[in-house]
Image (cartoon, helix red, strand yellow):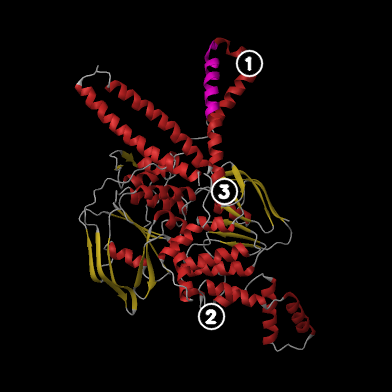
Amino acid sequence: MNYLSVSGLSKSFGEFKLFQGVSFGLEKGQKIGLVAKNGAGKSTLFKILMEKEIQDEGQVVYRDGLRIGWLEQEPDFGEAKTIEEYIHKSENPLIKLINQYESLLKLGDTESDEFNNLMNEIDELNAWAIDVKINEVLTNLKFTNKQLKIENLSGGQGRRLALAKSLIDEPDILYMDEPTNHLDFDMVEWLEKFVAESNLTLLLITHDRYFLDNVCNEIIELTPNGVYQFKGSYEYYLDKKAQREHNQQVVANKAKNLFKTELEWLRRQPKARGTKSKSRIEAAYKLEKVSKSVQAKKELEISSVMTRMGRKILEIEYLTKSFGDLKILQDFTYFFKRGEKIGIIGKNGTGKSTFLNLITGKDKEYKGSISTGSTVKFGYYNQKGLSFRNDMKVIDVVKDIAEVVQTKEGSKITASQMLTHFQFDPKKQHTQVELLSGGEKKRLYLVTVLMENPNFLILDEPTNDLDLETLTALENYLLDFNGCVVIVSHDRFFLDRICDHLFVFKGEGEVKDFPGNYTEYREYLKVGKQEAEGRKVDKKIVKEEREKKPKPIKLTYKEKLEMERLAQELEQLEDQKSNIEGQLSSGNIDGERINKLSVELGELVEKIDLITLTWMELADKEGE
């Protein structure tokens, strides 16, 4: 059953065209993930769908009588004073019946026909079950006191309460904008299961890739020129997107070569140009348009920084920290090693951010010892560090930090190049900061931290409000980063990909040092529960159970292309190697040339070995 039809939507702000030609539909029970770059118009599209913004062109048509819900970034609680009052001010027909019952009960009207008819309707619709659902949702989102005043809630609690209401209201269509923000791991996993098993019809914006994969059965990619739709999971979308972009690039390259030929034809005999075939001229300009329609995709290829790191890095001994009776750390000891990438997890309020402030010297009130090596240079990305002059241009913000930064290979990358790698095109670089979206400002802040050339990165919730392309770029950067990394994050995919070691903040000053990633830790907890029931298990069993899971038996399309590219590169490098060996054995070159060629040959052999190893890893995966 069709609930929503969107056709030909376009939206511009002045000369800036946000998107055009957006068309898609939403069927009953569908759960669709909406993905796009920051600033591409995802939130604006939601506002248009909710009639809070007017489109320039196109139509939005709903099926008659639908109730629409929207979980927005800044919730509006209206005049509600308490959690209970806010939850019960609802258009959910079951809640309205219960509210009506409570009103008649207060009036003592329990003998009238109205009350009897109401009771029959409540029984028929099983409206009493709504109380069970209210309690389930509020409890899992950590609201145990319904009389808690809304004015006393923190920003994160307010977002969680708005999320709870959107689930309890059960609208016919629910739009959700970053629903996993401000949720701990237990809440995210509960929400994921709740939504996946529900009958909700959902259009969702989220950067949580596990959530997208486990909840959505379709992905819509929003671009300036319309949308691409993919029936399947997020992983399926990534594979098909890579295939689509490759095919577009092939078509554009062919058009470019043909256009060069046609251009030569157009340039010949300029005086007789008026007699040339009009259709051929028009076809040539169409080829030009196609050849310029696809820009080469810029992948992040920044090597890690050159700032030297000595043997001593960060040594923590018997660190103890409290706020009154609240214990944050109790006798915590750890010596950091070069290249470590550690994730920090734990429930809200257990002291994760406090720990970061302690090790960076922002908080000096503690017991124990924190000793930092003389060569350590921190780069600290935190939620409160976002501060720019709105009248500045994006490029100037970064240049104020550094004009260039050195990579581990000795090459230099400019401020403009770094911005380009993080999805700021040249035009956007000369935009004023005040015109950036919230996600773009977070991305700019991340670039300024990296431009400081740190060798010890501390990232406090770096993935919040970053688009998926930027997340991939950041992950690639961190995987290549030779220094230390400490990450506080609720992004499970991000932690799994980057970290192989966790500090688990359990509260009351206890921190567990766990040698594994997030998924391994959750499996460890699961096995621990089984142990408590009488099964004796250890970390080895966790590993064995993880290895029992089905593994991919084929390469993705992108990996296949990479394997083909590596094979071609190896062939070229082998030819170069044979050429150099031929020159060295010829006996016709001087000593200086022999030395130079010998160095080149050594570097070439090393490169061949490295690429061969990568190719073999892909070949092994293909053969699984």
Residue 390 is left or right of residue 144, and the answer is left
Spot occupied by residue 456 in the image (x, y as percentages of width and height): 30, 54
Total marks shown come to: 3
Mark 1 nearby-residue class (10 Å; few <14, some 14–19, many ≥20): few
Q: Which amino acid does the dot numbered 3 rest on? A: Tyr
Residue labelled with disc 3: 236
Placement of 421 over or under 208, stated as above or below: above
Placement of 98 over or under 500, stated as above or below: below
Answer with the quarter of the image where residue 293 lies.
top right
- Which mark is first along the chain, 1 or 3? 3
Nearer to the camera, 39 or 612: 612
Residue labelled with disc 1: 277
Which type of secondary structure does the marked residue at label 3 adopt?
Answer: helix
- Which mark is first along the chain, 1 or 2? 2
Name the image quarter holding the N terminus.
bottom right
Residue 460 is left or right of residue 79, and the answer is left
Is residue 296 shown to the viewer in this render? no
Mark 2 nearby-residue class (10 Å; few <14, some 14–19, many ≥20): few
Residue 370 is left or right of residue 122, and the answer is left
Residue ID at (20%, 23%): 592
Answer with the quarter of the image where residue 273 lies.
top right
Mark 3 nearby-residue class (10 Å; few <14, some 14–19, many ≥20): some
Q: Is residue 127 magenta?
A: no
Q: Which residues are magenta?
A: 253-270
Spot occupied by residue 184 in the image (x, y as percentages of width and height): 47, 66
Answer with the quarter of the image where residue 100 lies.
bottom right
Residue labelled with disc 2: 147
Q: Are marks 3 and 2 in contact (CB under 8 Å)?
A: no
Is residue 126 shown to the viewer in this render? yes
- Which mark is first along the chain, 2 or 3? 2
